[in-house]
Amino acid sequence: MSGSGIDPTFLALPFRSLADVALARASELGATHADFRFERVRYQDLHVRDGVLLGTRDSSDVGFAVRVVHGGAWGFASGVVLTPEEARGVAERAVRVAQVAAAMTRVPVELAPEPTYADATWVSRYAVNPLEVPVAEKADLLIDFTERLRRSDAVQHATASVQQVLENKFYADLSGTSTTQQRVRLQPDVTAMGTDESTGVFDSMTSIAPPVGRGWEYFTAPASAGGWDWDAELAEIPDLLAEKLRAPSVEAGLYDLVIHPSNLWLTIHESIGHATELDRALGYEANYAGTSFATYDKLGSLQYGSPVMNVTGDRTVEHGLATIGYDDEGVETQQWDIVKDGVLVGYQLDRVMGHAKAELNGGRSNGCAYADSPGHIPIQRMANVSLQPAPDGPSTEELIGRVERGLYVVGDKSWSIDMQRYNFQFTGQRFYRIENGELAGQVRDVAYQATTTDFWGSMEAVGGPETYVLGGAFNCGKAQPGQTASVSHGCPTSLFRDVRILNTTEEAGK
């Protein structure tokens, strides 16, 4: 936990008295379950291009929601007027919604049990609240980043941006649980762009600094104190871009791949993270985002990958984007196995699914309910889903040394996957040829293509803990109405054998 504690301006808001009124009214009206969630989410973005601040955006989302189970059905309503009268009215509307929904609810809503947590507090670990740093100071830093990049002849344009979020939540329910929480997160983006004048090839090179659950120290502190080595990366990006612009186009075929965590996190997100959300596996997202090949009947038998594949769901890992102390159903967050020795052994659950599939996680939710604003109902959302390193595993250099003909993949870029999370292809920031265990320069126009089980089944080795990086995304979308969540995915550098490589220019018919 951070030593700073909960922001006193949030604590000054009347969420406790509003909760008392709303929960009492829901109980009076016969709700068998009711919860109250109060949120203040503050956002700030800055965008710089070629040494000029293009703009900043500051916004806040403040409000509260009441969710009930009445007559075996869900009811939900929300409000933004912070008065007892509004809290009472929102509770009444939530009950009315449940009464209408009861006629259409074939299976009564039942929630998995959860211990009571009275007046619990949780704060994410960070040193400097980014929203307390002057905007001018942050703008000057990003401007400097772009100016340093543009000193190179290879860089024609440079952009830098940062998204910052400070999220506060209060939760209370009829069982007596109440939690007050605070967390921060940052998403940096630094990109250099250039053109090879002799060929007309245009391309870009982007930082591999991941989004993090850290404060402003991520930009200013040394790595030992939670920072990123921006000086080193800014110094190497122009040369990496220049090499990429001159690089030959890849020859399509089968290659061994050594994949750095800055690329592999996204493959984990799309082919494991989404595929093991139990609501998708049960078909609940079918009309919007698809289902999953990892259906519930395959639990305990699906060979998801090779025996070196061990994947956990984790809402507790330090600095994770999906890390929180208690979820939006009052469940204490946890870590659990999703894939063990290559076999599917678990899913991501909320309290309804925890009750319905009591054989999972001891009949308890594993803390995966989340709503991105006070105006949205909590849904099952992704934990920090991570591939575990081998305790005595090889270094990245040792993994490269095992390859006679292959590619080393660094950084994420575009991706495509089908609605069952099975057939996919991914590109990257940069691809290096590996010849006889040595790197032999970049190649262009590369995508790797596979099915989920073939790809993870081809994983021969995972690196040791020193190769492990926690990557992630700020913008994972789900549900109707749509919600956005941030999530981290850790992994080590890993070795895959005989993966199909496409030449993207040839595939595009150019």
Image (tube, helix red, strand yellow):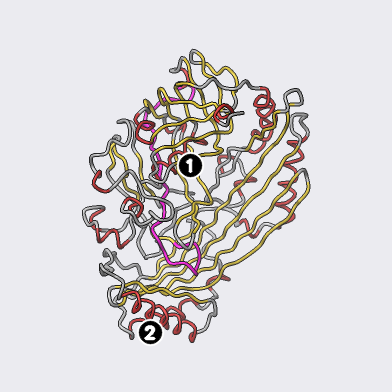
Asked if residue 104 is positioned above or below residue 218 in the image, the reply reads: below
Label 2 crowding class (10 Å Cα cut-off): few <14, some 14-19, many 20+?
many
Three-letter code for the amino acid on which mark 2 is drawn? Arg
Position of residue 510 in the picture relative to residue 335 (left or right):
right
User: Is residue 376 inside the magenta stretch?
Assistant: yes
Q: Position of residue 107 (x, y in %)?
A: 25, 67
Residue 104's image quarter?
A: bottom left
Q: Is residue 295 left or right of residue 5?
A: left
Q: What residue is at 45 percent from the left and 84 percent from the top? A: 89
Q: Tell me the magenta residue range.
A: 371-399
Q: Nearer the viewer, mark 2 or mark 1?
A: 2
Q: Position of residue 79 (x, y in %)?
A: 50, 77
Which quarter of the figure is the C terminus placed in? top right
Vertical order, 191 against 290 (above or below) = above
Q: Nearer the viewer, residue 307 or 167?
A: 307
Q: Which residue is mark 2?
A: 25
Location of residue 372 in the rendering, given as x and y in whole percent from the top left corner? 49, 62
| Residue 330 to residue 359: above or below | below
In front here: 128 or 283?
283
**Is 172 included in the stretch rendered in magenta?**
no
* Residue furthest to the top: 436
Mark 2 → mark 1, Cα distance in angstroms? 44 Å
Q: Mark on residue 144?
A: none
Residue 93 location, quadrant: bottom left
Local secondary structure at mark 2 = helix
* Residue farthest left in this picture: 359
Residue pictured at 62% horizontal, 38% vertical: 207
Q: Do the residues bearing badges 2 and 1 touch, measured as CB atoms within 8 Å? A: no
Q: Which residue is mark 1?
A: 470
